[in-house]
């Protein structure tokens, strides 16, 4: 029982039943348990979300391929999904084969040359050593040398790196397995969800789901096309300028190009820094070429490819990318725009429903 005075200074008593107290406590405990479960399942939910996004992206190619399989295999989504994922694995394997060996060689070369570089830094007769001595940086160099020696001699770091690599492989396999099952069982899931929707809402639900699917499909197809165009067009420049590891850099440009707004900027910085190891002229040419292509893409290529599939303003796109990257890095930036586009579809549907209800109410009052 609670007692308080109202504005007229009258004593008011409010009685709360035990059942109400229990309900409130149960709701609070359930909310806390739910938030805790979401926190512990965050990694699994991210993997499921990645699988769902890939399934939506691959659904159109899988359907197209299934309808063009020869003979009795026509319409076989399992076979079409298998072929599509094998193609994805081949592309991923080609990317790793072109990126991992250079990284290992460069890392090994850096480790081998580390003592020589440190000796040059501490040698007062060299030009670099004189600068170190002039600005009294010897203490920092010694600390760096000791830390580098301890890290190279620490086996726990190698074990940790091996563990992280194993987890990454498991995550990739888990995502591919869930994507495969979602693609194969997707039509059955759609039919099952349709049965859960009341008949009077079935038409609206189909329209809403169709609009959201078109947003995701249009975005994915557009971004993949734009990233592929950027990678293919910049590859000849790598060959002409003689920049090391051109295939690896082409894949880097493609991966960065998948992230809208900021992806090409990140790719330009990475490629320019790598080209700088060849020569300053090569780095300047690559940067200028990248900037020129980016302007052509922004004003000529992107509008035609994307065809306003998400219907989002540039400000909303930028906000979505920034929020997505802050939440989950490259993956967050990749899926942020289609998620924002789907939220826009839901909001427009809700506003349309409210407008229809208001018009019906006004018509009823007029009668």
Image (cartoon, helix red, strand yellow):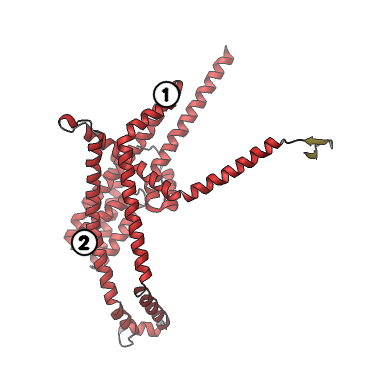
Report the number of numbered marks: 2
Viewer-proximal residue among 105 and 308: 105
Seen in the picture, residue 77 relative to 334 is either above or below; the reply is: above
| Mark in the foreground, 2 or 1 | 1
Provide residue 295's location: percent of width, then percent of height: 30, 50
Say which quadrant the C terminus sits in. top right
Provide residue 8's location: percent of width, then percent of height: 83, 35
Q: Is residue 167 left or right of residue 7?
A: left
Q: Is residue 352 left or right of residue 65?
A: right
Say which quadrant the N terminus sits in. top right
The residue that label 1 is drawn on is: 202
The extreme top residue here reads 367
Residue 307 seen from this side: no
Viewer-proximal residue among 61 and 80: 80
Viewer-proximal residue among 32 and 145: 32
Q: Residues within 10 Å of mark 2 (few under 14, many from 20)?
A: some
Could you tell me which secondary element the residue under label 2 belongs to? loop
Viewer-proximal residue among 99 and 302: 99
Q: In which quarter of the view is residue 336 placed?
A: top left
Seen in the picture, residue 365 relative to 17 is either above or below; the reply is: above
Residue visible at 37% across and 82% down in the picture: 132
Seen in the picture, residue 123 relative to 106 is either above or below; the reply is: below
Q: In which quarter of the view is residue 210 placed?
A: top left
Provide residue 265's location: percent of width, then percent of height: 34, 55
The residue that label 2 is drawn on is: 245
The extreme left residue here reads 71
Disc number placed over residue 5 in the picture, else none: none
Query: First in sequence: mark 2 or mark 1?
Result: 1
């Amino acid at each position: 029982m609670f007692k308080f005075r109202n504005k007229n200074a009258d004593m008011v008593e409010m009685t709360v039943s035990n059942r109400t107290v229990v309900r409130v406590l149960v709701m609070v405990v359930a909310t806390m348990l739910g938030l805790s479960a979401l926190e512990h399942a965050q990694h699994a939910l991210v993997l499921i979300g990645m699988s769902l996004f890939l399934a939506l992206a691959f659904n159109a190619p899988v359907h197209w391929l299934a309808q063009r399989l020869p003979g009795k295999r026509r319409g076989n989504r399992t076979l079409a999904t298998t072929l599509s994922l094998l193609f994805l694995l081949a592309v991923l394997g080609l990317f790793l084969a072109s990126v991992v060996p250079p990284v290992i060689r460069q890392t090994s070369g850096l480790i081998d040359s580390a003592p020589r570089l440190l000796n040059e830094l501490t040698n007062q007769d060299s030009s670099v050593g004189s600068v170190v001595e002039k600005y009294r940086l010897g203490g920092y160099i010694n600390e760096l040398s000791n830390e580098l020696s301890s890290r190279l001699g620490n086996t726990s770091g190698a074990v940790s790196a091996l563990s992280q690599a194993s987890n990454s492989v498991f995550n990739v396999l888990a995502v591919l397995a869930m994507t495969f099952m979602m693609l194969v069982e997707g039509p059955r899931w759609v039919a099952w969800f349709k049965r859960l929707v009341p008949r009077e809402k079935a038409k609206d639900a189909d329209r809403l789901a169709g609009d959201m699917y078109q947003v995701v499909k249009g975005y994915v197809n557009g971004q993949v096309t734009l990233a592929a165009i950027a990678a293919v067009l910049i590859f000849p420049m790598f060959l002409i300028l003689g920049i090391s590891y051109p295939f690896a850099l082409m894949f880097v440009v493609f991966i960065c190009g998948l992230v809208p707004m900021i992806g090409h900027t990140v790719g330009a910085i990475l490629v320019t820094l790598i080209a700088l190891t060849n020569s300053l002229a090569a780095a300047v040419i690559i940067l200028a070429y990248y900037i020129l292509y980016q302007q052509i893409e922004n004003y000529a290529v992107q509008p035609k490819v994307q065809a306003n599939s998400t219907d989002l303003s540039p400000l909303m796109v930028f906000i979505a990318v920034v929020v997505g990257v802050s939440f989950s890095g490259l993956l967050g930036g990749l899926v942020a725009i289609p998620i924002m586009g789907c939220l826009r579809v839901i909001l427009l549907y809700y506003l349309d429903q409210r407008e229809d209800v208001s018009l019906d109410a006004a018509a009823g009052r007029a009668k």
